[in-house]
Image (cartoon, rainbow, N blue to C red):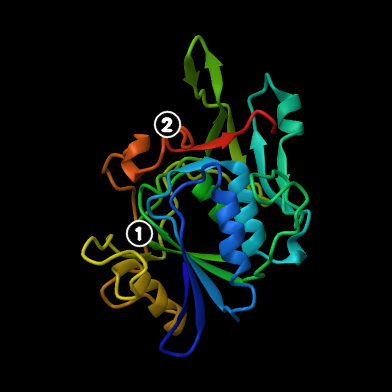
Amino acid sequence: SKVITTATGQRVGYVLFNAHTQGAQDKLIDTLGGMVTAGLSTMVLDMRYNGGGFVYTALSLATMLSGPSNENKVFERLQFNDKRPQDTAESTFVYTGALLFGETRYATNFALPRLALPRVYVLTTDNTCSASESVINGLRGVDVEVILVGKTTCGKPYGFTRKDNCGLAYFPIEFQGTNAKGFGDYAGGMPSTCNVPDDLDRPLGNVNEGLLSAALTHVDTGSCPPSASNASTGLSKAPINTKAGALGLPSATRPQMPGRVLTPRQ
């Protein structure tokens, strides 16, 4: 994470976020809390390799990016099938400045830092899935402008709760998530505003790296760079790497597939 000053003098936060795993929420609170006084005009959230994870982390992240004016508005509603109407009725996550699900350093009811940004940039590929898409969709539901730079996301508006049985863990698809406007139909992926290929020649966070550079150009000019097309069409056919080790993350804390996951206490 860092704060970047653009060519026109705008202050832009940059955060690389790779997985909604246990412990990620604490780190996000530390990082975004440190940016509250930085005078940011916008944020670039790099989730190009973020396959998802816990919904509570997505809720906390979206809450910190948005403002107090969204308090108690819907972040995501979970729609179960017609055999589980009670679960549907009881499964709405709302924006709240009081932390709902504590981890190690920050307990339940901790007052979250709020950046109150009207616009957020998200760097995406077809490995941007599920809980990561929840952040995008949830912010758009309360009229935070979210501009995607990169490629169409993977398209996974569905989620599950882990079920343990006889030494195995199952992740049966249980619900579809929708935002405050009732939208959740993006199984074909969310198209990018600036269609830019992933840059494997420069380190992530480098201002000259392809996706970040394109986002900073859009921050300054309101347009995609000439090398980018204006919109991504269609979903890349490249397979999603679903193995926990693909991102060098411990399998004990990362779901074994990209996902939108509820914890048992939710």
Q: Nearer the viewer, residue 108 or 186?
A: 108
> In the picture shown, does residue 127 fall above or below 202?
above
- Looking at the image, which residue is at 57% across and 57% down? 28
One can see residue 140 in this view: no
- Which residue is denoted by mark 2 in the rendering? 256
Q: Residues within 10 Å of mark 1 (few under 14, many from 20)?
A: many
Residue furthest out toward the top: 166
Position of residue 15 measured from the top left corner of the image (x, y, whole percent)? 47, 64
Q: Amino acid at mark 2?
A: Gln
Q: Is residue 184 left or right of residue 181?
A: left
- Nearest to viewer (mark 2 / mark 1): 2
> In the picture shown, does residue 3 fall above or below 175?
below
Which label sits on residue 232? 1
Q: Nearer the viewer, residue 139 or 51?
A: 51
Q: Secondary structure at mark 1?
A: loop
One can see residue 201 in this view: yes
- Residue 222 occupies quadrant: bottom left
Q: Nearer the viewer, residue 193 or 168?
A: 168
> In the picture shown, does residue 220 fall above or below 208?
below
Position of residue 125 measured from the top left corner of the image (x, y, whole percent)? 36, 53
- Residue 111 occupies quadrant: bottom right
- Looking at the image, which residue is at 40% across and 60% down? 192
Circle nearer the N terminus (2, 1): 1
Structural distance between the alpha carbons of marks 2 and 1: 28 Å
